[in-house]
Amino acid sequence: MTNVIELNGLTKFYGKVKGIEDVSFEVEEKEVFGFIGPNGAGKSTTIRTLLSLIFPTKGSATIFGKDCIKHASEIAMDVGYLPSEVFYYDGMKVKDLLNYSASFFKKDCKQKIEELSSLLDLPLNRKIEDLSFGNKKKVGIVQGLLHSPKLIILDEPSAGLDPLIQQTFFNILKQENERGATIFFSSHILSEVQRMCDRVAILKEGHLIALQKISELRKDSYKKVTVSGTLKEELDLENVTNRQSADEHTTFLYKGDVRKLLSTLAKQHIDDILIEEPSLEEIFLHYYQ
């Protein structure tokens, strides 16, 4: 399988402050690859270095087998990028901005713009300054995909999108992947990563600490449990961590048989229970401290 992205010892320091250090991994062609870690882990720094928006302190990276710095403009023709925050010319209409973006590519993007805008319910005739944050994010999605790129790089892509539009967006990404696009998906929301990705690279404090198939990440996943009521100080359960109590509400992380968890809690004086996926930050707190 051909590698679309290769990082070799990629390092970026901002003066004496570390962004990322000695990061190495590969992303295969047509793969949906997750890049995860808590906020501040170095995900955006890695992406900006890949896109030649900032230069590495040392190490190297290639996209399509081409050096990311030396061939940045050539690579950009086949890459779609959605940053975590989008900023545009406020006075421009959405359709004018998208047509301007399309003019950089040597192809007719009109049909793709219309198709994506319709799916996302994007108001093309409104000015950027009149859009909500969610609609501005939609503009970023269309802008990133309008030229049918071979590689799609997404940095916290669902922030600001309502649940219905998120579902539409993920369906669009699946279609792009089926078309043959490779997707590099950066997020700190575990459920999004589990939903979309084949493999994940896990970043912490600028270092790559794990490279896993998503099936392995699921197998090792903890659940976040929130209980309303009175619990004993000690529960007859293994693999309970990060327990916190306040105002008759207790939260903890649990890894194990859910049936045993429910059986144990049924013997307690509880009023309600919520079992959900923890955030990556919560997983990292107990996994990697």
Image: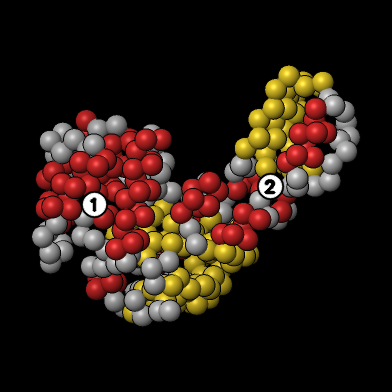
* Residue 67 visible to an observer of this rendering: no
Please say if the residues under marks 1 and 2 sit with CB atoms less than 8 Å apart.
Answer: no
Query: Which residue lies under the disc numbered 2?
Result: 222
Residue 212: quarter of image:
bottom right
Vertical side of 261 occupied by 248: above or below: above
Vertical side of 209 occupied by 226: above or below: above
**Colour treatment of the image:** secondary structure
- Residue plotted at (48% across, 58% down): 197
Q: CA distance from mark 1 to mark 2?
A: 37 Å
* Residue 26 visible to an observer of this rendering: yes
Q: Is residue 272 left or right of residue 138?
A: right
For marks 1 and 2, the one nearer the N-term is: 1
| Nearer to me, 52 or 276 | 276
- Residue plotted at (71% across, 53% down): 287
Residue 237 spot, x, y in % from top left: 84, 41
Residue 48 spot, x, y in % from top left: 39, 61
Q: Is residue 171 left or right of residue 277?
A: left
On-image quarter of the N terminus: bottom left
- Disc 2 secondary structure class: loop
Q: Which mark is residue 143?
A: 1
What residue type is disc 2 on? Tyr
| Nearer to me, 52 or 264 | 264
**In this rendering, which labeled residue sits more in front, label 1 or label 2?**
2
Category of crowding for the residue at label 1, using alpha-carbon neighbours closer than 10 angstroms: few (below 14), some (14–19), many (at least 20): many
Residue 22 spot, x, y in % from top left: 56, 72
Q: Is residue 252 left or right of residue 186?
A: right
Residue 203 spot, x, y in % from top left: 57, 60
Vertical side of 104 occupied by 161: above or below: above
- Residue plotted at (66% across, 51% down): 221
What residue type is disc 1 on? Gln
